[in-house]
Image (cartoon, grey):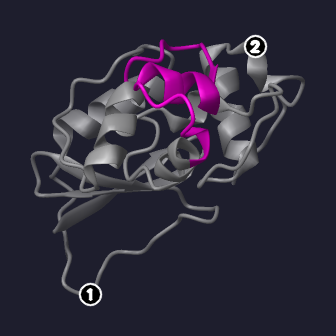
Amino acid sequence: MLYTYLQTPIGALLLAGDGHALSRISFPTGSRMMAPGPDWQRDDAAFILARQELTDYFNGKLRAFTVPLAPAGTPFQIQVWTALRAIPYGETITYGTLARRIGRPTASRAVGAANGANPLPIILPCHRVIGGTGALTGFGGGLPTKTWLLTLEGAAAAGSQTELAFA
């Protein structure tokens, strides 16, 4: 697996995959952060399109990604992650709504678990999924990162926590 880092306003994102398609994005903080595996090879020339699209996203110039993706997961997880791409930029939906959209109206907890296992956050926008009460719920990059991403997109669910700083 090849990897590189991309400096962003929320810190250095780890990008990994086969050099063409992305299979992983990891935040620099939060419960789902990861380090490169011992057999991974750093290639800072890899993922040119992903790096450009993510940079454009963080600069407010991109709302939909076209970079090739290769996430690994169960059929159910892939179904949930595919449905994430249909959530418009700047909008949020609940786990229950997402469960209904995939035809599994009683599976909101399973949808939440699949959301939490999303290997390509931001591009597969799991940050746009919120709790049934409208509250921001768990996020692999941490709630401050989720809030920051929603604020960048102008999502109403970002609430009043708009002044967040990242190192």
Taking the spot 15% from the left edge, 52% from the top edge, the residue there is 46
In the picture, measured across the screen, residue 68 lies left or right of residue 71, that is: left
Q: Which residues are magenta?
A: 85-109
In the picture, measured across the screen, residue 165 lies left or right of residue 34, that is: right
Q: CA distance from mark 1 to mark 2?
A: 41 Å
Please give the residue where the numbered disc 2 appears in the rendered image.
156
Nearer to us of marks 1 and 2 is: 2
The answer to whether the residue labelled 1 contacts the one labelled 2, judged by CB atoms less than 8 Å apart, is: no
Q: Position of residue 157 (x, y in %)?
A: 76, 21
Instruction: For mark 1, give the secondary structure.
Output: loop
- Residue farthest along the front direction in this orientation: 106
In the picture, measured across the screen, residue 60 lies left or right of residue 56, that is: right
Nearer to the camera, 46 or 143: 143
Nearer to the camera, 165 or 146: 146
Instruction: Pick the quarter of the image with the N terminus.
Output: bottom left
Q: Position of residue 18 (x, y in %)?
A: 11, 57
Instruction: For mark 2, give the secondary structure.
Output: helix
The kind of residue tagged 1 is: Pro
Is residue 119 in the magenta section?
Answer: no
Is residue 86 in the magenta section?
Answer: yes
Please give the residue where the numbered disc 1 appears in the rendered image.
38
Q: Dot 1: few (<14), some (14–19), or many (≥20) neighbours within 10 Å? A: few
The kind of residue tagged 2 is: Ala
